[in-house]
Amino acid sequence: MFSTATLAHDFTSGSIYIDHPMIQEAPPNAPVLGGYVTIHNNGDTADRLLAIESPVADKVELHQSVVTDGIARMQPMVSGLEVPAGEIVWLGDNGTHAMFVKPDRRYRAGDEIPATLVFEKAGRVDVTFKVEERSTVEGPGHEGHVR
Ligand SMILES: [Cu+2]
């Protein structure tokens, strides 16, 4: 019986619990894909998501969209994403997202994209981002990316 295992879509490393990494489906030839993930820190010390790596993208950047003077711009999250002790953080809040740059092909809803989350304390955690239709994503959009 594999059914329950395939339904679950979460990952654990030490006190870090990673829930439902997902990527928005993008139009054909889109130069970037936006990725989102929920991170629980069940420990009693803060951790920090420093980077994301993926073999199917040129690189993955952690970005935050900031609106200044009515214009949305993205800036790199130079110190990563803090995950305080005992808290749940969504990479997706406040315009934050992972940007997968130059994916090796078009990914459609239902596809899976392998990646590694790199934490300051929990270390490297291999995960799978599930590609989902754009309409399923709540919260801030990813507009301003597609050149
Ligand atoms: Cu971005």
Image (cartoon, rainbow, N blue to C red):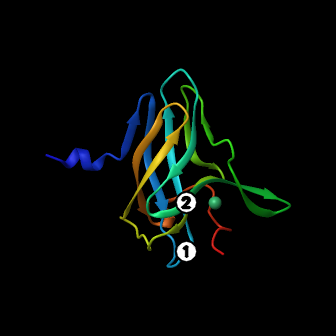
Picture coordinates of residue 51 (x, y %)?
Answer: 56, 47
Disc 1 from disc 2: Cα separation: 15 Å
Q: Is residue 83 above or below residue 9?
A: above
Picture coordinates of residue 76 (x, y %)?
Answer: 69, 53
- Considering the numbered disc 1 on the image, is that residue within a helix, a strand or a loop? loop
Picture coordinates of residue 115 (x, y %)?
Answer: 44, 53
Return the residue nearer the eye: 138 or 84: 84
The answer to whether marks 1 and 2 mark residues whose Cβ atoms lie closer than 8 Å is: no
In which quadrant is the C terminus drawn? bottom right
The verdict on label 1 being within 8 Å of ligand 1 is: no
Which residue is identified by label 2?
A: 59
| Residue drawn 42% across the image and 70% down it | 107
| Residue drawn 44% across the image and 59% down it | 55
User: Quadrant of residue 98 in the image?
Assistant: bottom right
Which residue is identified by label 1?
A: 30
Q: Quadrant of ligand 1?
A: bottom right
Tag 1: amino acid: Ala
Circle 1 packing at 10 Å, graded few (<14), some (14-19), many (20+), is some
Return the residue nearer the eye: 30 or 132: 30
Tag 2: amino acid: Lys
- Considering the numbered disc 2 on the image, is that residue within a helix, a strand or a loop? strand
State the residue lying farthest toward the left. Answer: 1
| Residue drawn 40% across the image and 67% down it | 109
